[in-house]
Image: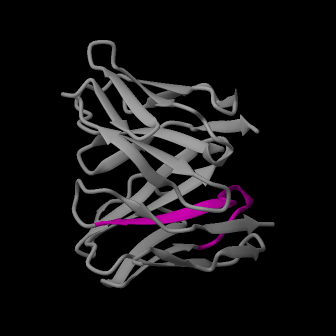
Amino acid sequence: DARVTQTPRDKVTEMGQEVTMRCQPILGHNTVFWYRQTMMQGLELLAYFRNRAPLDDSGMPKDRFSAEMPDATLATLKIQPSEPRDSAVYFCASGSGPQETQYFGPGTRLLVL
Amino acid sequence: QQQVKQSPQSLIVQKGGISIINCAYENTAFDYFPWYQQFPGKGPALLIAIRPDVSEKKEGRFTISFNKSAKQFSLHIMDSQPGDSATYFCAARYYDKIIFGKGTRLHILP
């Protein structure tokens, strides 16, 4: 049963700390997306990659957020330094092509105190 | 212009009734309109999708109606069941990106 996995599932941290979220896309998927979900803004696209190359990160606050794909089986999203307004659920999704169905992971629930 | 507007924010329907969620868009470059279903603690999952050259698509109890001239589309859930209680997102694709509506929290009364 192929699925997107994300770690950690929950993270509580203090303002100013670094947060790293990890995603393992479905094997063979070459497109990876990072989304943030909040009650106020809904689902927002932060960044996405194809074949490990970043294509668009315009939805991401550049000064504190960074996204990478060290290899085809791992995508990371880092926040440094974290702020209370970063509290949200962060989803990773993967797809087998640029216009194919996106499959979402279970999310990382982040709380910054 | 990149927005997808979704209504209502929340909806309560009796078991066996019809649930209807509406969405509207402005950008005529959108080429694909999926609906996602999300249960608490889970990620969104694709439920059903339609392309703009089709006016209706039905899969089981779920139907998308699409009005290209009005730039509107809707999800109908027939014979709604308590297990359908979830948050539903309409969406539209622009090149590689999926633009999501703000979501509708649906509750089906048993």
Residue at left offset 52%, top offset 63%? A91
Coordinates of residue B110 in the picture (x, y in percent): 76, 39
Q: How is the image coloured?
A: one colour
Is B77 magenta? The answer is no
Q: Is residue B70 left or right of residue A106?
A: left
Coordinates of residue A31 in the picture (x, y in percent): 29, 67
Coordinates of residue A80 in the picture (x, y in percent): 59, 73
Residue at left offset 30%, top offset 83%? A72
Residue at left offset 60%, top offset 35%? B80
Residue at left offset 43%, top offset 48%? B47
What's drawn in magenta, residue-wise? Answer: A80-95
Tell me: residue A79, above or below residue B84: below
Towards the viewer: A30 or A86: A30
Residue closest to the far top: B70
Quadrant (top left/top right/bottom left/bottom right) for the N terminus of chain B: top left
Tell me: residue A28, above or below residue A45: below
Q: Is residue B71 left or right of residue B104?
A: left
Coordinates of residue B42 in the picture (x, y in percent): 60, 62
Q: Is residue B44 left or right of residue B57?
A: right
Q: Is residue B38 left or right of residue A17?
A: left
Towards the viewer: B20 or A64: B20
Residue B33 seen anywhere in this rendered image of the structure: no
Towards the viewer: B10 or B99: B10
Image-quadrant location for residue A51? bottom left
Residue B18 seen anywhere in this rendered image of the structure: yes
Residue closest to the far right: A113
Image-quadrant location for residue A18? bottom right
Is A87 magenta? The answer is yes
Q: Count the labels in the image.
A: 0
Towards the viewer: A41 or B81: B81
Image-quadrant location for residue A25? bottom left
